Amino acid sequence: MDRIGMQDSMSEKVAVQHYRFSVATPAAAEPEWASLVARWHQLDDATFALVEAAHCFRRDFPQEWKKLQPQSIWLATPGGSNLADAEFVGKGCRSPSRFVGTLPSIRSSSLSLLMDWRGPVLCLQYGKTITAQGLSEVYWHLASSGESCDRPVWLISARHHERDDRKVFDVSFFVCGNDVAADFYLTASTAKIPNADKDVLAWLDRPSPDGKLQKYFSLGADVRMERSES
Amino acid sequence: MYVVGYGCYTAAGKGAHALYQGLLAGRDFCSPLDDSGWPAKPMTGARLCFWPESPPGATQCEVLVEALLSCVDQCKQQNADVVDIFSSGQLGVIFASTKGCIEDVVWQPDFQHAECDTLAPVLDGFLAKSAIEAKIKICVSNACSSVHGAVYLARSWIRSKRVRHVLIVAADSIGPFVVNGFSALKTFAETRVTPFAKERQGIQIGDAATAVLLSVDYKSKTMIKSVDIESDGFAATKSDQGGESLVKVVSTALAGAKPDLIIAHATGTPANDVVEDAVYGKLFGITVPVTATKWSIGHGLGASGGVDLIAALEVLTHQKVFAIGNTVAADPEFKGRYLVQGSSQDQGVIDRIITSTMGFGGMHGAMLVERCYG
């Protein structure tokens, strides 16, 4: 198969920039990107949140957005399309637009329209540790890519909670690459067991109880996060 | 990546032989819908291809696990030399599926609040019962392109030397959720599925489970030479009519080589077939024959890529090519060369086959499968 084999020089660290956005659904008004995504009003909540978050990324960080366009997008989808599945069933299994939303791949379609981008998309699932696993997967993917990887890989993950009868999605864009200014790094380790996604975000956001920022956090699959010195 | 073992379970029965012989014989395995006892009944008729046997009273998770176990047993029986792979400590396992065991949970009133995954339980249940040692494991849900996505990931695993072998298992079974969904989309054919025919009506869907064992250590007579996937973001349920994204993945997978056969996605819908013809007509004209499997055993959803891959492996091994058995004649406006009913099974030496897929969300995939000499 093309050229199977390990690259001779394997990067030990993969730099990661983390962008995080909070989106409440249903939308209170027509979004600014409505003209780019036809039938935006028929998008399921998770897809709408993802697209809105990407819009915020592009709007709030225009230079980074332009510079960091991905070679591939990996969606880490805890709970798959549960919300969309429930909506389809809850409305009597009659709505074609609701059924369309029941596949994680649909999110990439609307995202691609907003980004005017096309490329490989992988929709990964494995329960509540999928963000940690996804980061590990991207590390290994990039660590062996060598010179063929001149653009970053995006891992996108979202979790939701209920607030005041609305759903609030916390969407994270992990921009991973060898040519990226780092918020933190992915490095090889001996850790085997992935941590839950909520603990990944907690490590990113808050210091440990003793007030110090923990330098490392295990993702499992022999990968850990390492806080950047800068 | 060498293909060192494979197995499948479709409406044609258990085993690649049953699938291949059913395709060669031109059999359509569609059977009537019995929706008695279903929590929701579809708006329209549905063309469905069921597994011949399912354990009574079993959950969907149990049914899928048993189907996958059957497929892996076929791998082991096919090639006793590779049994050691399953306990080598160098095996990664990927489960490809669209909805997994959705029927077991989605009808429960508190489902939307449940933080459950409908794919992981199938993967974990399969691994527990099979006693396979998975060094790494994960699920891929890329709609109809799930197996192509899994192969893309498997390539990454092997390139990074995380593992030396990858087992890709795939399964989807049809039940009220997906049948109601496709019925809501009004995509089912009314009478027959006739891909690339002028009178094509739509799809049929089918139960399907596959297992494909890939290795870089063990040689075999067939290999997956390359794979490419792309999301084109044109629209949720259709691709742009020019098929630019499908052209890209097919061309990338071929890397300048010319295939001897194409196993197309070929759902038989008015829109998709137009796109595929635009692509194959543009790339190959009438120089490369095109065939398909979904007219026979139904669209296997997340496992459909695995079914097409196994059909390709059978063709490479036995050198007989099945036709699109339900299609009497291709649409006269189409430019590709379609193997319709009555086409010869002898299409010359077949060394390279492209399998292609078009999934919801504009997820396209193409895989080049080759025969190995020496």
Image (spheres, coloured by chain):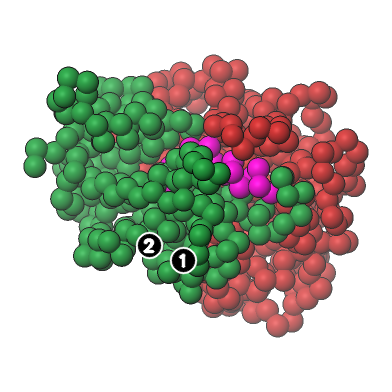
Chain colours: A green, B red
Furthest toward the bottom, the residue is B333
Q: How far across and down, in percent of the image, does residue A218 sit?
A: 28, 26
**Magenta span contains residue A80:** yes
Kindly check if marks 1 and 2 are in contact, taking CB atoms under 8 A apart as contact: yes
Find the magenta span and give its range: A75-88
Q: Which residue is mark 1?
A: A31
Q: Nearer the viewer, residue A176 or B221?
A: A176
Q: Specify whether A38 is left or right of A155.
A: right
| Quarter-of-image position of residue B251 | bottom left
In the rendered image of this protein, does residue B69 appear above or below residue B253? above
Earlier along the polypeptide chain: callout 1 or callout 2? 1
In the rendered image of this protein, does residue B62 appear above or below residue A47? above
Q: Specify whether B44 is left or right of B196.
A: right
| Labels 1 and 2 share a subunit | yes
C-alpha distance separating marks 1 and 2: 9 Å
Q: Is residue B190 visible?
A: yes
Q: Is residue B148 visible?
A: no
| Quarter-of-image position of residue B263 | bottom right
Q: Three-letter amino acid code at disc 1?
A: Pro
Residue depicted at 34% across the width and 28% down the height: A199
| Picture mark count | 2
Q: Three-letter amino acid code at disc 2?
A: His
Q: Which residue is mark 2?
A: A55
Q: How far across and down, in percent of the image, does residue B176 sit?
A: 78, 42
